[in-house]
Image: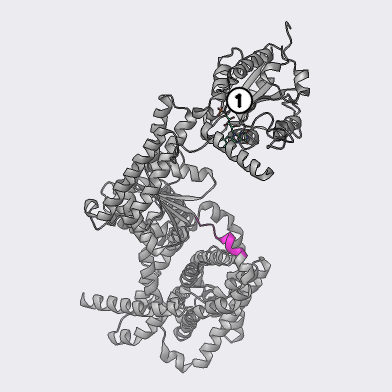
Amino acid sequence: MAKLIVYYAHPGHKYSHANKAMAAEARDVDGITFVDLYAEYPRFEINIDREQQRLLDHDVILFQFPMFWYSTPSLIKEWQDLVLEHGFAYGVGGDKLAGKCMILAVTAAGQNDAYTRQGYQQHPIRTFLTPLEQTAKLCHMDFSAPYVLYGSLRAPQEGLLEPHVEGYRKLLEAIRDDRYDLQAAVHGEVIACNELPILEGA
Amino acid sequence: MGEILLLAFLFLIAGVVAVPIASRLGLGSVLGYLIAGIAISPILKQLDVDVVSIQHFAEFGVVMMLFLVGLELEPRLLWSMRNKLLGLGGLQVGVTAALVMGIAMALGQPWSVAMAVGMVFALSSTAIVLQTLNEKGLMKSDGGQSSFSVLLFQDIAVIPMLAFIPLLALSELASVANSAADDGHGTGMSLVDGLSAWQQFGVTIVAISAVIVGGSYLTRPVFRFIATAKLRELFTAVALMMVVGIALLMTLVGLSPALGTFLAGVVLANSEYRHELESDIDPFKGLLLGLFFITVGAAINFDLLFANFGQIIALTSGLILIKSSVLLALAYAFKITNANRWLFSLGLAQAGEFGFVLLAFTVANGVIPAPLADKLLLVVALSMLLTPALFILYDKVIAPRYAGAQAREADEIDEDGSIIIAGVGRFGGVINRILLSAGYKTVVLDHHSEHLERLRAFDIKVFFGDATRPDLLHAAGIDNARMLIIAIDDREQAIEMVRYVVEHYPHIYIVARAFDRHHVYELWAAGCRDIIREHFDGSVRAARSALEALGHHPYDAERQTRGYVENDKVAMRELAGLYDPDIPVHENTAYVERTKAILASHEDAMRQSMAGFGSRIERGWLPPSLDDQAAAIADNAAKDGSSTQ
Ligand SMILES: Cc1cc2nc3c(=O)[nH]c(=O)nc-3n(C[C@H](O)[C@H](O)[C@H](O)COP(=O)(O)O)c2cc1C
């Protein structure tokens, strides 16, 4: 059984549809740790020791957030800046996270075809996530393909949110039960709810 | 009675007229007093006033000054000065005395007279030098500290000198001496007369221990007892009683009163009553020293001076030259650098008030013949009179040359720039702890003995005193402070304090605690620009807690309360500008109108936020609505269409 921690960050939780539903689902999964970062640190006073201990206690670190200006909500940035210390996460003696895996669960308002070279976002979504990817690398962690919901604002109306939330539960449970094909996921681009690399019967 | 009043009036008016003029001309207060003395000396002569005995009385100012100096000097600091004290001080006294003695013998004086003269001239003027250094803020500089070491050594050295001088007595003069004995200094009272050397030593040790032990253990209960009476003048009385008592004890056992009170000062330097003592004694010290300087000026015998003009001028300049050369050599040897070297050498180049004492004593003991002593007296007085000129030379000519080095030094000297916290109840207490933990130096004042008791139990250093008194603020170092935090529990006095400090120390940043909205406005009107309502933050947090408990997401609760705080701050600012302490609030129409308008706009904002958009509180992290998106897409399509066409 892999130990999974979900860090959820959404400053506008009140207005959220997609992430709110996903978070409710994740909170409901047994045997994993769920942290609402904005609830725990409403004044950004991140407890570094506690967070580092959490990292040590888990194998898979998942960040769930809406894409804001091609990046994360600011508290996740703050969290990284403080928690991923030299000597802990990277640099001399900084091997405490080696071998762990980072996964992102991102919602973006832009459509699938917008996040292409030809689309109006001009880059695939992975390009915007490279800072996190490289962060994982520098911390000796694997970076698994992100679980993405495109068109997040219209997804509820278009009936796309429900399958995404269901897929999210399956993803979390599979990771927890070591049924998630990390190998495949690490080499993938993005993962959608209808193509989860879940190993059957394992 | 009338005569005393007349005399007092004469001295006061002379000082009040002369000192401000001298200060304005940049000559320093000491020269002002000396000139005042010279100016009134003809009148004093007419009135047949015994200037010398007034001078002896006024010398008590020196005793008080050393007490105050001691208060500024923690034992640790004194100990770290021991090398300078003994080395620098000892060499200065020894070498100067020997040189002067040699010259006196070369001029034909017998060795015993020459030696006595050497001792007289080796001493410098504690009164003038410390007063001047303090006035110029040079006390903490290297030159100031070295000067102080030497002066302290001299003050101590007077005691063995007084013991030694009778041994030099000339037989022909001895008979005169007996009749003239007891000039007022070798007082008639003594506990140690007729005791053996060992017994004397024992009594001395007991007396010093009494000062140290009494200072450490008796002050606190005595002051606590006094505090119960809540009478301001009682503190002054106790402070005076202490200083006078110690001086008396020291005189009785044949020690220097100045040394005794200095020791007591050092013992009390760590006490929470330090600033209270300082502010109580300081005015007396100032007045007595002023009186002392006036008498020095008044005692100059101009008839004698003009009769022997050349000789006395030559002797005086010779003396200043010798003393400053010795000091300069020592300054090199002890690695006192730059401008400090000159401050040290020029500052201490005069003879001093103890010179008067010793001269009177030598005459009384038949060591120096009276006619010679009169001339020497003139030399001492003249050299003191010239000291301010030497300081001016230092200020105007020497210091500017080292200006670069000085500026660098200024940082080190500047141990102050401390933060004064007035009132250390729960409010001030938290501020103090946070500032201390951030590494700042605070000076905490409070006049509740309960607060002091409580804090002392936790080893927190607090000074007793009513922070609303300007003299106590001064003693606590407001002149050099960088910030004042007003956390006293009296709203009117807090306002007074703001007004006073804003007016007299406009550069000091003030943070004030307010009790309520109107207190804020009053503090604002008084000139404070950083005002914290004491219950405001607590209420805001309680509201936030309530929102969280009602199921609001903690971050929403945080945003909601933050928004309230922001709105409130803006409104406060605006209303503070309209508030007028002289008009009752409900009669102040501008204020009332604005309040109504602000309340109305708050309600609007609230209603809007109910609708889900737009207010200061609710803005943020809202993606465009579906309608907005549709509109944008249509817009884009239209543009694309037009561009492809
Ligand atoms: C401040 C802000 C910035 C945003 N920046 C982007 C962006 O750069 N790219 C994007 O595709 N969507 C962006 N969006 C849209 C959000 O990703 C979208 O609101 C979110 O995924 C919806 O999820 P939710 O229902 O959980 O709030 C932004 C939204 C906000 C409020």
Left or right of residue A170: residue B159: left
Furthest residue in direction top, as rendered? A201
**Residue B235 lies in quadrant:** bottom left
Residue annotated with mark 1: A7
Q: Nearer the viewer, residue A90 or A101?
A: A101
Asked if residue B640 shows in the view, the reply is yes
Residue A3 screen position, x and y as percent: 66, 16
Is B298 in front, or is A71?
A71
Q: Of all residues shown, which one is farthest toward the front?
A: B645
Q: Quadrant of residue B195?
A: bottom left
Classify mark 1: helix, strand or loop.
Answer: strand
- Tell me if residue B13 comes above or below residue A43 in the rendering: below
How crowded pointer 1 is (Cα within 10 Å; few <14, some 14-19, many 20+) is rated as many
Q: On what subunit does the disc labeled 1 rest?
A: A
Height in image: B639 above or below B409? above
Residue nearest the observer in this picture, B89 or B632:
B632
Looking at the rendering, the quadrant in which ligand 1 lies is: top right
Callout 1, which amino acid?
Tyr
Residue B412 is covered by the magenta coloring: yes
Residue B497 among those drawn in magenta: no
Residue under the point 64% across and 35% down = A71
Residue B606 position in % (x across, y down): 37, 37
Chain part drawn in magenta? B408-417
Where's residue A156, x and y in %? 56, 22
- Work out which quarter of the rendered image holds the C terminus of chain A and state it: top right
In the displayed structure, A34 sits above or below A38; it is above
